[in-house]
Image (cartoon, helix red, strand yellow):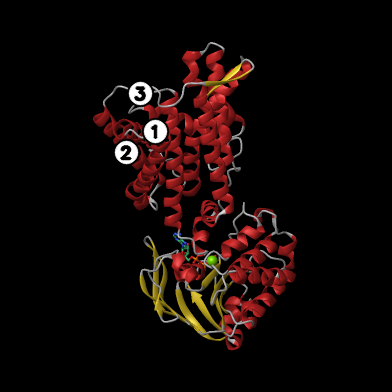
Amino acid sequence: MLTIRNLSVNYGAIRALTGVSLQVQRREIIALIGANGAGKTTVLNTISGIVPATGGTIIFEDRDITRIPPHKIAAAGIAHVPEGRKVFPRMTVIENLEMGAYIRRDKEGIKASFQEVFQRFPRLSERKNQPAATLSGGEQQMLAMGRALMAKPQLVLMDEPSMGLAPLLVETIFEIIKEINQSGTTILLVEQNAHMALSIAHRAYVLEIGEIVLNGNAAELADNPEVRKAYLGE
Amino acid sequence: MLWQQLINGLALGSTYALIALGYTMVYGIIQLINFAHGEIFMAGAFFAFLMVMVLKVNIFIALILAMAFCMLLGIFIEFVAYRRLRNSSRLSALISAIGVSIFLSTLALLVFGADAKGFPDGIFPNGQLQLGSVSISFLQILIFVVSGFLMLTLQFIVHRTKIGKAMRATSQDYNTAALMGVNVNMVISFTFALGSMLAAAGGVLVGVYFNAVSFNMGLLVGLKAFAAAVLGGIGSIPGAMLGGILLGVTEVFTVTVGFSSYRDAIAFAVLVLVLLFRPSGLLGQKIQKKV
Ligand SMILES: Nc1ncnc2c1ncn2[C@@H]1O[C@H](COP(=O)(O)OP(=O)(O)OP(=O)(O)O)[C@@H](O)[C@H]1O
Ligand SMILES: [Mg+2]
């Protein structure tokens, strides 16, 4: 469904990605793990079009989206839960969710999506009319995820959904990611919490200073001694 | 006396508010102080003047045509002078804005000369409404009706329509708005269109109110409206409305108590005072450090 070939990205003179290739099949959860500054966020931002690629190609559903502006990529069916949530602080929960459905026109379908999101995140429904800035960190994460689901995306990019959350909430969030995947949505998950990410992913890629150094079956990677040492704290 | 001056102040303040809205909306979205905004206001006044003199249309038609003209002018200026600089330093865009401002006022000077132009007599009925000791001229009523209507419409657009929500989202988080599928370039053009349209309405109203249209009218009024936007909290739409009205009322009262030679200074004195105590303006967001 998503094929990245030989992707390079520079920020001015700084090289952030070098020859990154990865593939996401329909209905998979793919984990992308790596240390701080490895370039994980850059991969997602380049897919979404908010960071321009210096070289390489990104193909989504047989269409080259490498140089397409972000709003068209969203319309093509890729939703993005950005690093640090990035909810619209002075808009209410409802308005944030409406923004998630910005590309859609089917009023009835949007209504149904609201129902689904509120069912999945009852906390959001209790806080419908509150400005997003007043939500707790965990609630903002739920809002950012709900907002992405409102687009009815084919593929969701998630950037460190567990960042800064209490362990119990991290479990819940990962449980929800699994459910979202089981209901048919493909997920590309960036995580520092490699342990959790590998436990729900089908396959995984390891990024080190802008390059993919390992990839394969998530369970196998979790057993790989190098991975265990570098990312699982053993 | 007091009430009369209040009415006069509100009329003047409403026009400042119309112009201040453009500064605040553009700043809210791309953090640019659009120095050419005062000249868009001037262009609106001149365009209406031309329409009245050449095409002999009535003032309402001239108002609408001037708004439409400035809408296109605003979109054009953003496209030509600011869009390419969006990812450069803020200073470059600001300098480009000052350039556009000087270009437009010089162009007006060349075309229309240095003397202020007046609208022909009888362009608007001269009568007034007497409420006890207070008299409200028909022109002031026109100002209240037009600016009130435009500000309500703006509120409706910003809060109730899809494009308005996209504007708010873009001003709160530019990149994330794009991730939602918002075409941010289109939203920015739309913002310039709205702001310029309001400035044109302000220009026509001011031009008729003082019966003077001149190439440099955008400078002082533009500065005052900018002060009003900052006073209300730059980026805040209700703030620009409040700031404009406060500034107009203060100015009129300054003249009333006999300091008329200080009328232009007072706007800025008020601005400095308020900012000393509330750096983000009356209704502005607390300035947050980006993490
Ligand atoms: N806008 C930018 N300008 C310049 N350099 C940048 C920019 N964004 C990221 N970088 C650099 O690119 C590299 C990769 O950054 P990126 O944010 O993609 O890493 P990451 O893997 O997401 O890290 P983290 O786990 O800390 O979120 C880093 O060295 C970073 O300093
Ligand atoms: Mg990151």
Asked whether disc 1 touches disc 2, contact meaning CB atoms under 8 Å apart, the reply is no
The image quarter containing residue B39 is top left
Q: Which x, y percent locates residue A144?
A: 62, 65
Chain letter of the residue carrying label 2: B
Provide the residue designation for mark 1. B58
In this rendering, do the residues under marks 3 and 1 share a single chain?
A: yes
Q: Is residue B203 left or right of residue B251?
A: left
**Point 39% across, 48% down: residue:** B89
Q: Which x, y percent locates residue B107?
A: 27, 34
The image quarter containing residue A203 is bottom right
Of residues A229 and B57, the one drawn nearer to the viewer in this rendering: B57
Determine crowd level at label 2: few under 14, some 14-19, many 20+ residues with C-alpha closer than 10 A.
Answer: some
In the rendered view, tell whether residue B175 sits above or below residue B82.
below
**For marks 3 and 1 on the same chain, the one whose residue lies earlier in the sequence:** 1
The image quarter containing residue A210 is bottom left
**Point 35% across, 24% down: residue:** B120
Mark closer to the observer (3, 1) = 1
Asked whether disc 3 touches disc 1, contact meaning CB atoms under 8 Å apart, the reply is no
Q: The residue tagged with tag 3: helix, strand or loop?
A: loop
Provide the residue designation for mark 3. B118
Q: Is residue B189 left or right of residue A97?
A: left
Q: The residue tagged with tag 2: helix, strand or loop?
A: helix
Provide the residue designation for mark 2. B99
Determine crowd level at label 3: few under 14, some 14-19, many 20+ residues with C-alpha closer than 10 A.
Answer: some
**For marks 2 and 3 on the same chain, the one whose residue lies earlier in the sequence:** 2
